[in-house]
Image (tube, grey):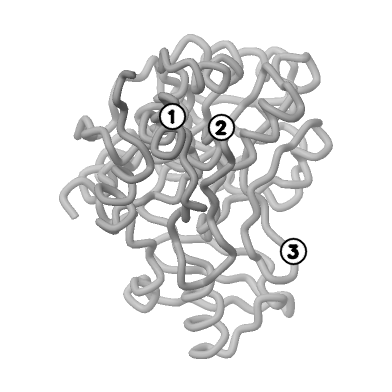
């Protein structure tokens, strides 16, 4: 039997070391469904049921270790390789959109043309803003789930198992933070028999610029609710632009210094140096373009095709003028942090 590292190595090297990103890749690929992330504010890493095909039955596995982004060294690049950097925005109004709504427009166009038949992303409960990993299967659903999330304390790739194993989808797009892109790229590049079906099903990877993400309970319950007396249901929109900007249902805004919410940053984020999602086909963010536009780093031919398709359909408007220096500056800040 070829000995491969299993969840016990993940537990020692990643979970117990406090560097787990919480991406959910290990949960998705475990063939025994033995890994899960409990809905417990005190637990921000996967838990094992104790059963493992390899450890228990001596059947070669190691799928979970194969796809963990924290078991591989980061490449340390700022912007990485990309074909072009453009500004883009949706040509139609999209409710709850963040910046230009470009990502939503690209994926809605892809759905309409059959280029994809599923999207893995994070949505949130409209009243509590609690994040939920979801599988979206139509353009209409995609429009409903538009907007950025800052509480990524949910294993987003968990929904990939439903998409690939249960629903047998074969043309999937994934929207996620840099760690999610790292895990998805490991799946696509893997020759592991148990991982390959997931990699083959991934058609497009859209990465989001990310300085860090926040654990739900410390941010929403401890800081916003208890300290600032802001109820979750009062929040209409959240944005981070040098501070946490909250738009409330009564029309008022609240600005909270980032220093105040540092305690809510996911522990695993502190070891990440990737701001621009280097492993994505398309990286997207609001830095580097004017208000109302999305900055897109188009990294691969696949990403370029999806963008051009949305432009050709009239769903996406683009401009060539972007401030790459602004993006680089934030990437440098994260890598030196």
Q: Residue at x 49, y 22 (%)?
A: 195
Q: Between disc 2 and disc 3, whose residue precedes?
A: 2
In the rendered image, the vertical position of residue 163 relative to residue 218, given as above or below: above
Question: Residue 286, image x and y in percent?
Answer: 48, 45
Q: Between disc 3 and disc 1, whose residue precedes?
A: 1
In this picture, residue 221 sits left or right of residue 85: right
- State the SS at label 1: helix
In this picture, residue 213 sits left or right of residue 77: right
Q: Residue at x 37, y 78 (%)?
A: 260
Q: Which mark is residue 31?
A: 2
Q: Residue furthest left?
A: 336
| Residue contact between numbered discs 2 and 1, judged by CB atoms under 8 Å | yes
Quadrant containing the C terminus in the rendered view: bottom left
Q: Which mark is residue 296?
A: none
Question: Mark 1 packing: few (<14 Cα in 10 Å), some, or many (20+)?
Answer: many
Question: Residue 63, image x and y in percent?
Answer: 43, 29
Q: Quadrant of residue 104?
A: top right
Q: Between disc 2 and disc 1, whose residue precedes?
A: 2
Q: Which residue is mark 1?
A: 63
In the rendered image, the vertical position of residue 98 relative to residue 119, given as above or below: below
Q: Nearer the viewer, mark 3 or mark 1?
A: 1
Q: Quadrant of residue 277?
A: top left
């Amino acid at each position: 039997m070829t000995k491969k590292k299993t969840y016990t190595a993940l537990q020692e090297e990643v979970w117990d070391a406090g560097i787990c990103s919480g991406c959910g890749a290990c949960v998705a690929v475990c063939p025994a469904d033995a890994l899960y992330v409990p809905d417990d504010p005190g637990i921000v890493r996967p838990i094992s049921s104790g059963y493992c095909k390899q450890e228990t039955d001596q059947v070669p596995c190691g799928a979970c270790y194969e796809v963990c982004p924290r078991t591989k060294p980061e490449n340390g690049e700022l912007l990485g390789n990309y074909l072009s950097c453009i500004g883009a925005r949706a040509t139609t109004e999209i409710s709850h959109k963040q910046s230009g709504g470009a990502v939503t427009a690209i994926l809605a166009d892809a759905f309409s043309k059959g280029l994809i038949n599923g999207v893995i992303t994070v949505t949130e409960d409209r009243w509590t803003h609690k994040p939920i990993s979801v599988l979206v299967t139509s353009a209409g659903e995609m429009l409903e789930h538009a907007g950025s999330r800052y509480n990524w304390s949910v294993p987003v790739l968990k929904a990939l198992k439903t998409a690939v194993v249960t629903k047998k989808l074969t043309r999937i797009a994934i929207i996620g933070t840099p760690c999610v892109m790292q895990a998805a790229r490991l799946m696509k590049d893997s020759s592991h028999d148990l991982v390959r079906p997931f990699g083959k099903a991934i058609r497009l990877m859209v990465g989001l610029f990310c300085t860090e993400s926040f654990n739900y309970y410390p941010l929403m319950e401890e800081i916003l609710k208890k300290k600032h007396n802001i109820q979750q249901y009062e929040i209409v929109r959240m944005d981070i632009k040098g501070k946490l900007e909250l738009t409330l249902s009564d029309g008022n805004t609240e600005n909270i210094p980032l220093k105040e919410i540092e305690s809510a940053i996911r522990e695993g984020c502190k070891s990440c140096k990737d701001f621009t999602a280097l492993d994505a086909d398309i990286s997207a963010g609001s830095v580097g373009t004017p208000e109302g536009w999305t900055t897109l780093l188009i990294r691969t031919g696949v990403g370029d095709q999806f963008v051009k398709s949305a432009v050709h359909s009239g769903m996406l408007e683009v401009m060539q003028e972007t401030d790459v220096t602004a993006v680089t500056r934030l990437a440098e800040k994260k890598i030196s942090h």
